[in-house]
Image: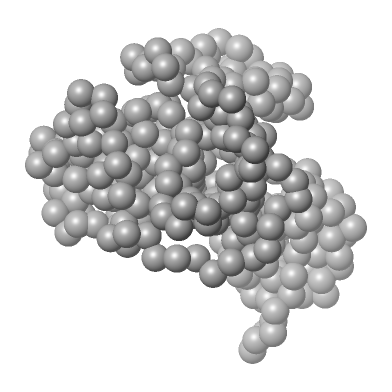
Amino acid sequence: MQKTSARLLALLSLLQTRRDWSGEDLAERLDVTPRTVRRDVDRLRELGYPITAFKGPSGGYRLDAGSQLPPLLFDDGQAVALAVALQTAATDTTIGEDATRALSTVRQVMPPRLRHRIDLLRVTAVQPPANDDASPGDTRLLMELSNAIHARVELRFDYDQGRPAAERPRRTQPHHLVTWQGRWYLIAWDLDRDDWRTFRADRVRPRTPTGPRFTPRELPGGDVSAFVTGRFRGTDGTTTDWPCRGEVVLNLPATAVAPFARDGIVEELGPGHCRLTLGSWSWTGLAAAIGRFDTDMEVIGPPQLTTAFARLAERYANAARHS
């Protein structure tokens, strides 16, 4: 039988691999009794891991999100992958400073063998050509706007347009936070003008407190991508009429995707995922362009994009077999 400390790490590793585990399955994998599993779960809870028990034929456990970040456990491959991702993110103008600090924290607790591997690896992420007038956005401001959207509360703010400030702040119902051509925009219903408006996020100066909760309205056309492209069509001298256009949800934050999708529309959905709408001259080319983000994703549509992903997967599998 493993020592208690090693067994706790093994138990934590199993709980992180899938959502639900029965008590019997955990006991069998760890070669202990169900009673020992219960005691070890209690020990992990004392260390801050939010493990909940659920009812069933034999009962079980799952590792949930908590109110604070407990110690994390990574295997060697995960630790290296995390360091590579943080090195890449460190070049981003929006989250670069936070990514650099996170990389320093991770490196400090790595065992020497992994730290040496990371020190030998240097990742340089080449940013696309920037629009000189584009603003990367302030992380705290983006989070404040995002919180108002998800809480569905009215937002009051001063809007800096290079002219003397209006006497009254803008009163809005915020609906979407998106990027277009490297710049962040807030899509909101303007209560005073009784119409939809698109605001540059870097010009928004929120006031506190926020207003009352509201019931979201239906966006014209019901599609964020169509709304944004309709508002900005031709304003920068480029065309958005790609023959192939698809939509996916990526398991990455919008701030990590936006710098590398300047020709697309990135909609923030939550702290760890976003919706990307992108165009290309072919469905296969579009699938390949989206695949470079190297993360799990859900294809929203259209069916031609799903078919293109399947076709690429088959080609890659054939190439791997003959290599």
Foreground pick, 146 / 63: 146
| Colour treatment of the image | one colour
Residue 195 on image: x %, y %: 41, 55
Can you see residue 279? yes
Residue plotted at (66% across, 26% down)? 98
Foreground pick, 285 / 246: 246
Q: Is residue 251 above or below residue 21?
A: above
Residue plotted at (59% across, 66% down)? 214
Q: Is residue 31 above or below residue 310?
A: below
Residue 58 on image: x %, y %: 67, 85
| Figure quadrant of residue 133 | top left
**Label tally:** 0
In this rendering, position of residue 193 left or right of residue 219? right
Outermost residue toward the bottom in this view: 57
| Figure quadrant of residue 7 | bottom right
Please identify the quadrant where the N terminus is shown.
Answer: bottom right
Residue plotted at (65% across, 20% down)? 97
Residue 42 on image: x %, y %: 86, 65
Please identify the quadrant where the C terminus is shown.
Answer: top left
| Figure quadrant of residue 298 | bottom left
Outermost residue toward the front in this view: 167
In this rendering, position of residue 203 left or right of residue 307? right
Q: Is residue 100 above or below residue 188?
A: above
Can you see residue 143? no
Residue 215 on image: x %, y %: 54, 69
Residue plotted at (63% across, 70% down)? 21
